[in-house]
Image: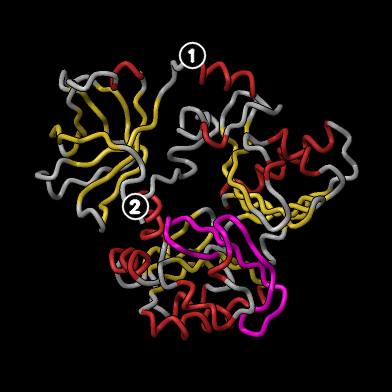
């Protein structure tokens, strides 16, 4: 199992460490609920250095990645980023990722840690398939750390130690400047929490220094180091999909509710298959739901069964947790047949501890921040 460069800092902070995507990662420090609320009301800091980091560069690199992904990369310019999916020939999602355009001929791909090698193999296969000798792939995962600063006070926490005007940076943009006296640091206005926040890309030799600098400054803003548990509940409140739960090679972006990053006005792998799926509409659907207010103590979990009022199984929960903001259980799940959710007269349930617990299907996100 691998360790991030910040591992010893997590140990000093008495984090509960678990194995996640092949890395020793902090699950929580003191309380996942306190960490969650810190991000919603103040500021939290995350180590997400396990994420895969791949540099793709060469002439026409954007046209190349355009064919492998569902979103339209030609819509962004240098110093902008885009959320997208790498797709397979069956329409399934190899990975969801963020693409940073460093320049016209240089892209930074941030991928899920568990999929890094799979992504590299897929990309290299197509480079060779089309004899694109001018395009190169460089894996910099083990050379850089990523620190995520999230919450309404994230700007206050790091603005005094950077020459980048953070309040002027639009969502899904980035700049390269100095941070805590270290030059050439990439700071992006991105995050997996829905809160105001930034992700900082740091050469490993400076990671511990910058982590501690941010914690020191953040104390006046009630900063909390945050682990995977709060990261998961934060992303779920926003309805953000998680690879391995709502996303996989057997799930299409149409089924996962990601039509908004599936652009049919361009050519890409499985375009026609996905267009047909969207047009015909006969596919499983991702839904969001709340536990009935009166049923306290029942928390949805991955694998729980969804039923209708005829006690017929209609789907399965993919993600669930207790929402500290709503103070109730929330979840995502797939309904296998759209006909199950076309009638307003149908009641829905989740099967927990041998009981059918009422749920309410709602629109995402669960909360507004």
Q: Is residue 62 above or below residue 209?
A: above
In this rendering, position of residue 75 left or right of residue 12? right
Q: Is residue 314 above or below residue 55?
A: above
Asked which secondary structure carries label 2, the reply is loop
Q: What range of the chain is rendered magenta?
A: 169-198
Asked which secondary structure carries label 1, the reply is helix
Identify the residue at image location x=43%, y=55%.
194
Q: Residues within 10 Å of mark 2 (few under 14, many from 20)?
A: few
Identify the residue at image location x=17%, y=26%.
347
Q: What residue did someone put label 2 on?
A: 368
Instruction: Name the one closer to the observer, 123 or 210.
Output: 210
In this rendering, position of residue 32 left or right of residue 87? left
Q: Is residue 183 magenta?
A: yes
Q: Residues within 10 Å of mark 1 (few under 14, many from 20)?
A: few
Q: Looking at this rendering, what residue extends furthest in the left direction?
A: 294
Identify the residue at image location x=60%, y=42%.
84
Q: Is residue 172 above or below residue 279?
A: below
Q: Is residue 121 magenta?
A: no
Residue 262 image offset from top left, x and y in percent:
58, 32
Splitting the image into 4 quarters, where does residue 362 fall? top left
Identify the residue at image location x=20%, y=28%.
348
Real-space Cα separation, disc 1 to disc 2, in angstroms = 32 Å
Q: Are marks 1 and 2 in contact (CB under 8 Å)?
A: no
Q: Which mark is residue 328?
A: none
In this rendering, position of residue 102 left or right of residue 225? right
Residue 112 image offset from top left, x and y in percent:
57, 50
In this rendering, position of residue 147 left or right of residue 89? left
Residue 20 image offset from top left, x and y in percent:
48, 56
Q: What residue did someone put label 1 on?
A: 280
């Amino acid at each position: 199992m691998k360790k991030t460069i910040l591992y010893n800092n997590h140990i000093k902070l008495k984090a509960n460490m678990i194995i996640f995507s092949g890395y020793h990662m902090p699950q929580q420090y003191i309380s996942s609920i306190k960490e969650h609320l810190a991000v919603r009301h103040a500021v939290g800091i995350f180590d997400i250095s396990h994420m895969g980091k791949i540099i793709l560069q060469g002439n026409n690199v954007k046209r190349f990645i355009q064919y492998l992904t569902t979103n339209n990369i030609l819509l962004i310019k240098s110093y902008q980023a885009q959320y997208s999916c790498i797709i397979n020939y069956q329409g399934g999602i190899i990975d969801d990722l963020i693409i940073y355009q460093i320049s016209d001929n240089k892209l930074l791909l941030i991928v899920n840690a568990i999929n890094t090698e799979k992504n590299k193999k897929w990309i290299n296969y197509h480079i060779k398939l089309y004899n694109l000798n001018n395009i190169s792939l460089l894996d910099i995962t083990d050379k850089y750390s990523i620190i995520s600063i999230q919450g309404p006070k994230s700007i206050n926490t790091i603005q005094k130690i950077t020459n980048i005007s953070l309040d002027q940076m639009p969502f899904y943009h980035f700049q390269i400047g100095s941070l805590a006296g270290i030059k050439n640091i990439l700071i992006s206005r991105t995050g997996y929490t829905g809160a105001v926040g930034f992700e900082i890309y740091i050469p490993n030799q400076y990671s511990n220094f910058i982590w501690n600098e941010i914690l020191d400054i953040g104390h006046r803003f009630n900063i909390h180091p945050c682990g995977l548990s709060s990261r998961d509940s934060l992303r779920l409140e926003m309805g953000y999909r998680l690879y391995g739960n709502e996303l996989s090679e057997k799930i299409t972006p149409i089924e996962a509710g990601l039509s908004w990053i599936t652009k049919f006005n361009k050519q890409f792998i499985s375009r026609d298959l996905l267009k047909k799926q969207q047009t015909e509409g006969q596919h499983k659907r991702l839904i969001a739901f709340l536990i009935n207010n009166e049923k306290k103590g029942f928390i949805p979990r991955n694998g729980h069964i969804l039923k209708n009022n005829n006690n017929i199984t209609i789907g399965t929960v993919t993600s669930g947790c207790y929402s500290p903001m709503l103070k109730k259980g929330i979840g995502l799940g797939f309904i296998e047949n759209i006909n199950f959710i076309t009638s307003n007269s149908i009641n829905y349930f989740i099967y927990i501890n041998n009981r059918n617990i009422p749920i309410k299907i709602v629109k995402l996100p669960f909360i507004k921040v």
